[in-house]
Image: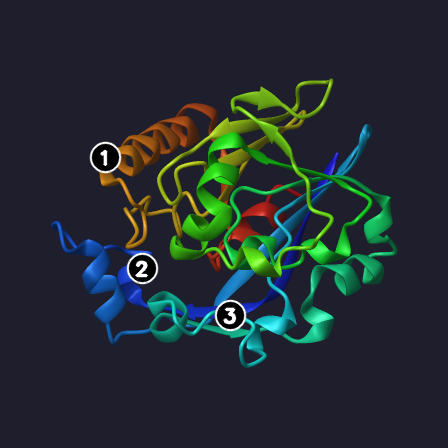
């Protein structure tokens, strides 16, 4: 079993999104912050598994840079995010450069449905898309658009398999779906256990290894409990921890050999 990182462009966000401000005005301070991060990777992951190819998150689409693709009426898209994604950065072309095709992918697992994790869904009409019941309920419909999900941009064919994590994705039990609510209510992470490593593909459970509460999480108590649990799991299992927007994630994965 092998894990490949796939970087689908970069994103700038407010520093107060990466590490939320203290206090009850955390989300307001994130929206009004004027400090931007360095370019952060938008990572997706390919797992070569004996039961079939698995993609965890699909990264962003180059269409996110087109005027009108993302809703300007939403304050987050208007004030808080800047994408840099070229057509060749999308996950479909990158899989082909690895000698694979999106049609070869059995499962697409979405840690959550924010656009920089689900933007590349259009490349996978033949794959089984997996997300959680809670995430789907939070992200769909008019309420989902208010929550920051541009769900009118999802493919018309999208009918995901909804799971209630924790659950095993593979029959072998070596790729598991673990509930990590916080960044979003239905967020999950994916754990991969090999002969010599325990890997946590963490999505946006945190933005890096600091396990900091971010500026977006709607319920800070839930997010803090998840972060404490993840930190303990990393220590207990000597896990390799791979958040989506951490510039060190690729190097940590490569260090496994």
Q: Secondary structure at mark 1?
A: helix
Q: Which mark is on residue 79?
A: none
In three-dimensional space, the C-alpha distance between marks 2 and 1, rounded to whole angstroms, equals 17 Å
Residue 148 x, y percent position in the rendering: 42, 57
Q: Secondary structure at mark 3?
A: loop
Splitting the image into 4 quarters, where does residue 20 fall? bottom left
Q: Is residue 132 left or right of residue 73?
A: right
Q: Which residue is mark 3?
A: 70
Residue 81 x, y percent position in the rendering: 41, 70
Front tag of 3 and 1 = 3
Seen at 14% across and 52% down, the residue is 22
In three-dimensional space, the C-alpha distance between marks 3 and 2, rounded to whole angstroms, equals 19 Å
Residue 198 in view of the camera: no
Q: Which residue is mark 2?
A: 17
Q: Is residue 192 left or right of residue 46?
A: left
Residue 197 x, y percent position in the rendering: 60, 31
Residue 214 x, y percent position in the rendering: 30, 51
Q: Is residue 150 left or right of residue 76?
A: right
Seen at 63% across and 66% down, the residue is 61
Splitting the image into 4 quarters, where does residue 192 fall? top right
- Please say if 257 is above or below 83: above
Q: Secondary structure at mark 2?
A: helix
Q: Residues within 10 Å of mark 3 (few under 14, many from 20)?
A: some
Q: Residues within 10 Å of mark 1 (few under 14, many from 20)?
A: few
Q: Which residue is mark 1?
A: 221
């Amino acid at each position: 079993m092998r894990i490949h990182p796939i970087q689908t462009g970069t994103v700038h966000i407010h520093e107060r999104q990466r590490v939320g401000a203290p206090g009850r005005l955390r989300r307001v301070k994130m929206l009004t912050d004027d400090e931007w991060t360095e370019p952060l990777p938008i990572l997706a992951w390919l797992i070569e598994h004996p039961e079939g190819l698995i993609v965890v998150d699909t990264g962003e689409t180059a269409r996110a840079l087109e005027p009108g693709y993302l809703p300007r009426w939403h304050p987050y898209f208007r004030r808080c995010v800047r994408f840099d994604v070229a057509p060749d950065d999308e996950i479909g072309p990158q899989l082909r450069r690895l000698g694979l095709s999106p049609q070869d992918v059995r499962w697409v697992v979405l840690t959550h449905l924010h656009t920089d994790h689900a933007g590349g869904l259009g490349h996978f009409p033949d794959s089984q898309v997996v997300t959680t019941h809670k995430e789907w309920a939070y992200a769909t419909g008019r309420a989902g658009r208010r929550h920051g999900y541009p769900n009118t941009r999802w493919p018309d064919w999208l009918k995901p398999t909804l799971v209630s994590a924790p659950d095993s994705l593979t029959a072998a039990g070596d790729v598991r779906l673990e509930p990590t609510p916080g960044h979003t209510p239905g967020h999950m992470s994916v754990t991969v256990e090999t002969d010599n490593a325990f890997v946590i593909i963490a999505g946006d459970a945190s933005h890096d290894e600091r396990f900091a509460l971010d500026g977006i999480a709607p319920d800070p108590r839930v997010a803090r409990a998840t972060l404490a649990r993840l930190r303990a799991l990393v220590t207990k299992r000597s896990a390799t921890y791979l958040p989506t927007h951490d510039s060190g994630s690729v190097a940590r994965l490569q260090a496994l050999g």
